[in-house]
Image: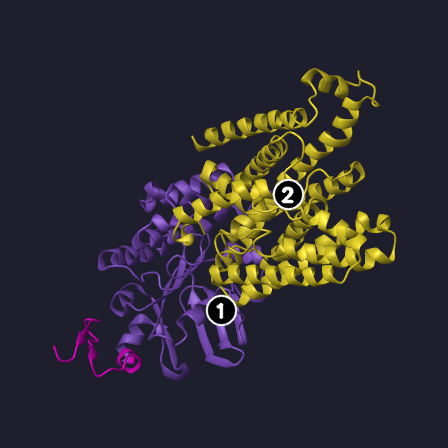
Amino acid sequence: MEAKTLLAINGLSVGYPDKVILKDMLLHIPAKSIVAVLGLNGKGKSTFIRTLAGLQPALQGNILFNERPLSSYTAIERAQLFSIVLPGRGDVVQGLLVHELFHTTRVTFTNGFGKITDDDIQLINRICTSLHIEHLLHKRIYQLSDGEAQLVFIARALIQDTPIIFMDEPTSYLDVVNKAEIFNLIQSLPQQNKTVVFTSHELELALQIADYCLLIGNEGKHVFGTTKTIIEQGYIPDFFNSKNVQFDRITGRISLKNA
Amino acid sequence: MNNQRHSVWFVLLSILVLVLFFADILIGSVSISLNEIIQVFTGQLPTDTPQSIIILQSRLPKALTAILAGCALPVAGLLMQTFFRNPVAGPDILGVSAGSSLLVALVMLTVGTWFSMDVFSNVGIILAAIVGAMLVLFIILGVAARVRDSVTLLIFGLMFGMAISAVVGVLQYYSSQGALKLFIMWTFGSLSGVTWSQLYILAVIVIIGLLLAVTQIKALNLLLLGEQYATSLGLNIRKSKIFIILTTGLLTGAITAFCGPIAFIGIAVPHLARMIFKVNSHAIILPASVLLGICILLICDIIAQTPGNDGVLPINAITAFMGAPFIIYIIWKNQHLKRVF
């Protein structure tokens, strides 16, 4: 195919020992692409992305990054390979200052007691400038609005400076303006050599920026392909089957059936 | 700007530690002048004069004990607060001190009566206190894995502490009078009962504990990001948990063994440090807690011996008198405790 595969997923099963959620997954994701993981609530989007990020073990099959299995990477190597953006503010201590969040993210790659270098500080400054969040550096996590918090946590992932970023619901709780800002930001990331895999409920917006889609439906049904194929083959109405909405294959729009 | 402010505070606190240390030696039921103190330290006064004996055998070890307890308890409290992500965690609150008491009671009231107390007085008690502290920490860790709510964990810790105290009470009922008297003396909590030979053991353990804590600074900062972000940044959560429990157990156990359970210092001082330094980074808060803890315990010790000039107030009464209102203020100010943690 086109570019070299960065992330290869072969025969993967995800879920919990007593409950397999998705099985026999086969995905090959080239570098610098955007992958949207789409599906209704509770179908395994988060479980899938958490498994990729090594936060929970795969039940079966393997995940290869640069043709090397995930399990063969050390914890620090993983931290240099991929970063995550958890839903909302994650479990971060609410009184933490934004600049402390960023410093601690860089400190993980230092030896000993964790003194960060001028390069680290420059990287932090550069990313804060490009995301226009310098004014948030001295705020505490609880003082941020939902939109600001989302930007801060994406900035945190960028500051971790990894080729792959996993985002779990990066636009939950956001209004339409903030959603658009985050989607524009995600769209710009491949230019910085980033590969993004994100879950979302924003079908329309996600389809506009994603190169690839993974659709997850009922009973572990799933399909992966380029966004173009997924739309043209008519998978969307199949997976988002409802008597209330309809999907327009040409425009990529969703509308109410009775409107 | 922040760094400058921090440096000023560190210098101020260091000076304050020195001033309070000398003040603590200066003040006592027998008035000894500063001049005489300097003479004792420089060896100009013979060691068998009353002044020398009071200073070298009583006031100096007591002040040094206050310093060691002032280092150890706030660091133990800070570690527990970060570890359990709970602003009101502390060795005395979550039953860790109670765990120490139980094992010390077991040793003092049972094993200690079979052998001569001398054999067990130092090593036995300190080991019992450390093991007791760690046992409770592991139990609370197990509970914390199942209940994520910090208030639930807190209530569990309180109940657990009370249950342990009840067991200690039963033990007391069945023990001999001699052993009981020794144990009751111990539970009063005191900085003054520590002899030089005990002080050496205490100092070694506290220094080991502090060094261990310093090696955990990076891990503690990562834990503030929550376990998932910390894991994704390469932290081995299980390893750092064991290290943190070991460190907290050593620090709490060692102090509890020789000074009895001292309340509130462990929980209150880290909050004071966060209020003054306005950051969360353990690279700042840990040394700040150490300096503030020393200052506060020295102040408590000075207050403990001033009234009436004769007897000495129990140190626990002073720390609770100062610590309880402060913690109430912290809770009042952050009605959503989540804002701190």
Q: Does residue A52 sit above or below A186 in this rendering? A: below
Gap between marks 2 and 1, in whole Å? 40 Å
Residue A255 in the magenta stretch? The answer is yes
Q: Does residue B59 sit above or below B229 in this rendering? A: above
Q: Amino acid at mark 2?
A: Ala
Q: Which labelled disc corresponds to residue A51?
A: 1
Chain ID for label 1?
Answer: A
In front: A256, or B168?
B168
Q: Does residue A21 sit above or below A77 in this rendering? A: below
At 56% from the left and 65% from the top, the residue drawn is B143
Magenta-drawn segment: A235-259
Task: Count all numbered tags in the image, as a single digit.
Answer: 2
| Observer able to see residue B162 | yes
Q: Residues within 10 Å of mark 1 (few under 14, many from 20)?
A: some
In front: A165, or B294?
B294
- From the viewer's perspective, is A205 left or right of B28? left
Q: Does residue B298 sit above or below B127 in this rendering? A: above
Residues marked 2 and 1, same chain: no
Q: Quadrant of residue B258?
A: top right
Q: Secondary structure beneath disc 1?
A: helix
Q: Chain B hue? A: yellow
| Observer able to see residue A115 | no
At 44% from the left and 71% from the top, the residue drawn is A48
| Residue B77, horizontal then vertical, whole percent | 57, 48
Chain ID for label 2?
Answer: B
| Residue B133, horizontal then vertical, whole percent | 67, 55
- From the viewer's perspective, is A189 left or right of A53? left
